């Protein structure tokens, strides 16, 4: 299976736990969500204002996070094809993400030499 569609290099990818989706992040500022059954592109998101450095699925869901050179971490729904949350805290490019095994928190890191821990809360988010 070969997936084509990004205009610039792919910098990161992740596969959902159920092995049905793959998300790819690129220097072209886009994230693409692909179906692994036929290799079709389900959706292409203009995700960040600069290169998308990292993409990670939340375990046992089709939600995922992205990190970008625009200093932002964003939270997405791969089934509804929409952004859920924008997390601003870094004062430089965000280069890497890790999601905890239970999905209760993520850690981001970047050019500002900081590690940021983002914990899930019970706050209501309006989309």
Image: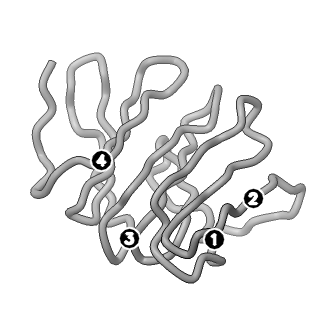
Nearer to us: label 1 or label 4: 1
Q: Which residue is mark 2?
A: 118
Q: Which residue is mark 1?
A: 87
Q: For the residues labelled 2 and 4, say whether their Cβ atoms are less than 8 Å apart.
A: no
**Residue 32, numbered circle:** 4
Identify which residue is drawn at 62% across, 66% down: 85
Q: Can you say which quadrant of the picture contains the N terminus?
A: top left
Identify which residue is drawn at 42% across, 77% down: 70
**Depth check: 32 or 91 in front?**
91
**Secondary structure of the residue carrying numbered label 4:** strand
Q: For the residues labelled 2 and 1, say whether their Cβ atoms are less than 8 Å apart.
A: yes
| Crowd around label 2: few <14 · some 14–19 · many ≥20 (10 Å) | some
Nearer to us: label 2 or label 4: 2
Q: Which residue is mark 3?
A: 48
- Real-space Cα separation, disc 2 to disc 4, in angstroms: 24 Å
| Crowd around label 3: few <14 · some 14–19 · many ≥20 (10 Å) | many
Left or right for 11, reference 93: left
Which comes before the other along the chain, label 3 or label 2? 3
- Real-space Cα separation, disc 2 to disc 1, in angstroms: 9 Å
| Crowd around label 4: few <14 · some 14–19 · many ≥20 (10 Å) | many
């Amino acid at each position: 299976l070969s997936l084509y569609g990004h205009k610039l290099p792919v910098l990161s990818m992740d596969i959902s736990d159920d092995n049905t989706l793959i998300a790819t992040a690129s220097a072209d500022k886009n994230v693409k969500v692909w179906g692994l059954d036929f290799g079709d592109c389900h959706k292409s998101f203009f995700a960040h204002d600069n290169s998308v450095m990292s993409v990670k699925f939340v375990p046992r869901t089709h939600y995922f996070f992205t990190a970008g050179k625009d200093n932002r971490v964003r939270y997405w729904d791969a089934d509804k094809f929409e952004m859920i949350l924008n997390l601003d805290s870094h004062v430089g490019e965000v280069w890497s993400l890790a999601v905890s095994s239970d999905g209760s928190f993520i850690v981001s890191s970047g050019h500002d030499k900081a590690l940021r821990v983002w914990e899930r809360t019970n706050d209501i988010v309006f989309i």
